[in-house]
């Protein structure tokens, strides 16, 4: 992906990024600022057309946004004037799904995300963590094949963020959805990525890939217990050092 700039200059945001993602995989993407993480996600979502190469999903080229890909943003992007229930059921309603089926599906999803008592609440009455639960439920209501998450937990406090990390793992395991999650947190990338990509700038590229056991562990184990493991701590330090070296290189270039 190359972006054109005023004056005829350009920035090569991504170069030779190539990967296959299997159905049901949970992949986290990590890297220093400016490495193209969000650009990559926007290309997969169909919000951006790559200047070279293509994205293939279920044998079809991605040429724009589509219902088979659901997006969860850092901020919930919810309709604040609607109730929680109407937010979650918005997608199916736009597709013309019958009201009884929408109600049944919304009830199921609110139960899954722990908001069964908040269906008639307005979005503005909810905390940040609860709003992100609504955003997850709304995404699932459309039954996408792939869920794309762009820093979905970045604005939450530490305790709420940990609870939401557990919810993401629960949803992944219970729904079997394919998930790509962008994060700036090494800890979160380790916890939520059975597959983890570390990206490097510039241009953005895949620097290293890991296959990790921690997401699977976190489904059945308290996340705090996972964080106490020696192998978790070793991987965290390894990746932190890797990204720190990249950041120093970036700063060095600027100087």
Image (spheres, rainbow, N blue to C red):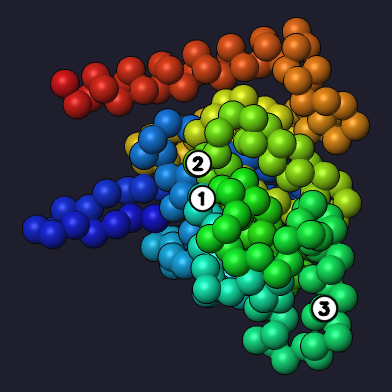
Find disc 1 in the rendering and name its residue: 74
- Label 1 CA crowd tier, 10 Å (few <14, some 14–19, many 20+): some
Q: Give the percent coordinates (x, y) of residue 166.
A: 76, 37
Separation of residues labelled 1 and 2 (CA atoms):
7 Å
Find disc 2 in the rendering and name its residue: 155
* Mark 1 in CB contact with mark 2 (< 8 angstroms): yes
In depth, the one of 224 and 177 nearer the eye is 224
Q: Give the percent coordinates (x, y) of residue 87.
A: 64, 71
Separation of residues labelled 1 and 3 (CA atoms):
27 Å
Image quadrant assignment for residue 216:
top right
Q: Give the percent coordinates (x, y) of residue 132.
A: 62, 52
Q: Would residue 181 be found to the left or right of residue 51 on screen?
A: right
Residue 123 visible at all:
yes
Which labelled disc corresponds to residue 103? 3
Q: Secondary structure at mark 1?
A: loop
Image quadrant assignment for residue 55:
bottom right
Q: Which of the marked residues, 1 or 3, is nearer the chain's N terminus?
A: 1
């Amino acid at each position: 992906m190359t972006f054109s700039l005023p004056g005829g200059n350009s920035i090569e945001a991504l170069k030779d990024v190539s990967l296959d993602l299997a159905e049901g995989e949970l992949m986290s993407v990590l890297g220093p600022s400016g490495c193209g993480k969000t650009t990559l996600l926007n290309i997969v979502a169909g919000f951006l057309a790559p200047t070279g190469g293509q994205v293939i999903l279920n044998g079809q080229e991605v040429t724009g946004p589509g219902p088979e890909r659901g997006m969860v943003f850092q901020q919930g992007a919810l309709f604040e004037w609607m109730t929680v229930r109407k937010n979650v059921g918005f997608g199916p309603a736009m597709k013309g799904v019958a009201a009884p089926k929408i109600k049944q599906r919304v009830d199921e999803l609110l139960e899954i995300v722990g908001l069964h008592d908040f269906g008639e609440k307005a979005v503005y009455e909810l905390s940040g963590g609860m709003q992100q639960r609504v955003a997850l439920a709304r995404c699932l209501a459309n039954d996408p094949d792939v869920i794309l998450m762009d820093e979905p937990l970045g604005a939450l406090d530490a305790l709420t963020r940990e609870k939401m990390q557990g919810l993401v793992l629960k949803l992944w395991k219970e729904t079997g959805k394919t998930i790509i999650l962008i994060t700036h947190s090494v800890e979160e990338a380790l916890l939520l990525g059975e597959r983890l990509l570390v990206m490097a700038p510039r241009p953005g590229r895949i620097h290293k890939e890991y296959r990790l056991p921690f997401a699977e562990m976190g489904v059945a184990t308290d996340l705090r217990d996972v964080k106490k493991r020696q192998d978790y701590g070793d991987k965290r330090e390894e990746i932190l050092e890797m990204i720190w070296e990249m950041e120093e290189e970036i700063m060095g270039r600027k100087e």
